[in-house]
Image (tube, grey):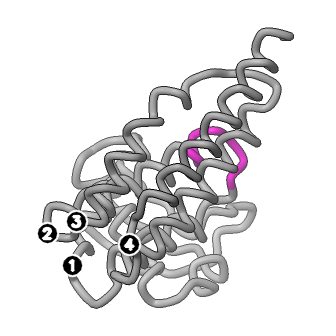
Amino acid sequence: MKVLRKHIPGERSPAVADFYEQTITLNEPAYSQFDDFTQRFILQHERGHLALDTLDEMAADRYAFDALAGSEPYSLRKSVEALENSLPYTNPEHYARLRQQLRRALEWDANHGNPDAAKALAELDRYAYYTDYQGSNWESYQKQQIVKTRADSDKILAGSYTLNTSSIVLMGVFFVVVILVGFSFRKKG
């Protein structure tokens, strides 16, 4: 597998994988605008496409996460930030990818002994089944959920977060309000 660095005219992505040539092209200057960890994440993501022989973006995200999780201090948070900063959020899949990355980081942290991450993961899963509706407000709803989950995850993955009863109640109220608003838009459409 070869890795090339060059400008690809008309390409907005920071990197592309070529299955036929088994090469990864890092698109300068788009690739160089990211920090070192994000660049490594992008490279691992593209390696994931080739290694797994897939166009599935979530599978490539998982490959990159698995390659970098636990590799250095704050790698979980950095892996979420890498995906968050490198996606343009031009379609609903981007929100789903970020949500899945948050889930991966919390799951990894919970499996490695962080009880706060385990609690946050349970809360995230508790409300997950409400995210599959479509409506005029769908992207806004997804973005609100990501922003809230992202803020909570930053605290957890930094190791300085305590999930107490009042924060659970506030999260519950927030999600119930968002869900009710979402369903009212859905019924009108």
Give the alpha-carbon distance from disc 3 to disc 2, as whole Å.
9 Å
The residue singled out by tag 2 in the image is 112
The residue singled out by tag 4 in the image is 162
Q: Which amino acid does label 3 sit on?
A: Pro
Answer whether residue 25 is magenta in the image.
no
Residue 119 image point, x, y percent: 31, 55
Closest to the observer, 174 or 76 = 174
> Which mark's residue is nearer the viewer, 3 or 2?
3
> Which mark's residue is nearer the viewer, 1 or 3?
3
Answer whether residue 93 is magenta in the image.
yes
Q: Do the residues labelled 2 and 1 touch (CB within 8 Å)?
A: yes
Quick one: label 3, few (<14), some, or many (20+) residues within 10 Å?
A: some
Q: Earlier in the sequence, mark 1 or mark 4?
A: 1
Q: Which of marks 1 and 3 is nearer the N terminus?
A: 1
Residue 61 image point, x, y percent: 37, 56
Span shown in magenta: 89-95
The residue singled out by tag 1 in the image is 70
Q: Which amino acid does label 1 sit on?
A: Gly
Quick one: label 4, few (<14), some, or many (20+) residues within 10 Å?
A: some
Q: Which amino acid does label 4 sit on?
A: Thr
Secondary structure under the numbered disc 4 in the rendered image: loop
Give the alpha-carbon distance from disc 1 to disc 4, as whole Å.
21 Å
Q: Earlier in the sequence, mark 2 or mark 4?
A: 2
Give the alpha-carbon distance from disc 2 to disc 4, as whole Å.
17 Å
Q: Do the residues labelled 1 and 4 touch (CB within 8 Å)?
A: no
Residue extending furthest toward the front: 165
The residue singled out by tag 3 in the image is 115
Secondary structure under the numbered disc 2 in the rendered image: loop
Q: Are marks 1 and 3 in contact (CB under 8 Å)?
A: no
Give the alpha-carbon distance from disc 1 to disc 3, as whole Å.
17 Å
Residue 95 image point, x, y percent: 59, 47
State which quadrant residue 47 falls in.
Answer: bottom left
